[in-house]
Image (cartoon, rainbow, N blue to C red):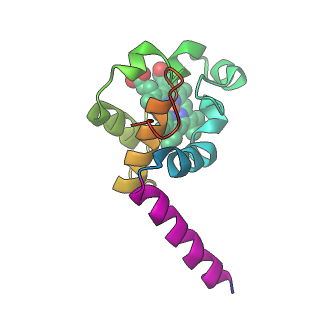
Amino acid sequence: MAARVLAVLAFVLGLAAAWGLGGGAGRRIFDSRCATCHGAGGRGAPGMARLFGVPPQNMDLSSAGVQKMTDEDLARTISEGRGPMPPFKGVLGPEQMREVIAHIRSLAAPRKPGRAK
Ligand code: HEC
């Protein structure tokens, strides 16, 4: 029963990825792995910034500084972690890494649905 639900879920996620609806899977990964610190909208959770003693703008993923990083730079930072941020190497697979980066891109200026790439 549970396996069946998982199979259906995997199928739907696979379809979403195949259709290029990166916002879906990427957002789910972001919500479960990143939002605690970076906030649901990716602008940084002020309480976390205080806790870590990091300026809140360092945790704002919609900032120009983060948005001008290349996908490779983002993947490296996310894999290796940064300061209080834990490394996600081995936690996120290559596909999940691409999806979460696509989600970070979608945090910049609001864009039309379906054009998040
Ligand atoms: C435990 C809290 C925490 C979690 C979880 C976390 N981060 Fe971070 N992240 C931080 C902090 C703190 C910084 C700022 C570090 C600094 O400036 O020293 C940061 C910085 C970043 C940066 C900017 C790096 C730069 O060079 O400016 C990116 C991109 C980023 N995080 C992505 C992510 C993604 C994607 C996830 C989820 C897969 C994630 N983070 C999960 C705490 C976290």
Q: Is residue 7 magenta?
A: yes
Give the image location of residue 81, x and y in percent. Answer: 43, 36
Of residues 31 and 105, the one nearer the viewer is 105
Name the image quarter holding the N terminus.
bottom right
Of residues 22 and 71, the one nearer the viewer is 22
The image quadrant that residue 59 belongs to is: top right
Give the image location of residue 74, x and y in percent. Answer: 35, 33
Give the image location of residue 55, x and y in percent. Answer: 57, 12
Residue extending farthest to the right is 47
The answer to whether residue 24 is left or right of residue 5 is: left
Q: Looking at the image, which residue is at 56% across and 44% down?
A: 27
Give the image location of residue 7, x and y in percent. Answer: 55, 78
Q: Looking at the image, which residue is at 46% across and 43% down?
A: 100
- Is the stretch drawn in magenta largely helix, strand or loop? helix
Name the image quarter holding the C terminus.
top left
Q: Is residue 23 visible?
A: yes
The image quadrant that residue 6 belongs to is: bottom right
Of residues 8 and 45, the one nearer the viewer is 8
The image quadrant that residue 48 belongs to is: top right
In the image, is residue 2 above or below residue 51?
Answer: below
In the image, is residue 14 above or below residue 69?
Answer: below
- Which span is picked out in magenta? 2-19
Q: Looking at the image, which residue is at 37% across and 34% down?
A: 77
In the image, is residue 94 above or below residue 13?
Answer: above
Residue extending farthest to the bottom is 1
Q: Is residue 85 visible?
A: no
Q: Looking at the image, which residue is at 60% across and 22% down?
A: 43
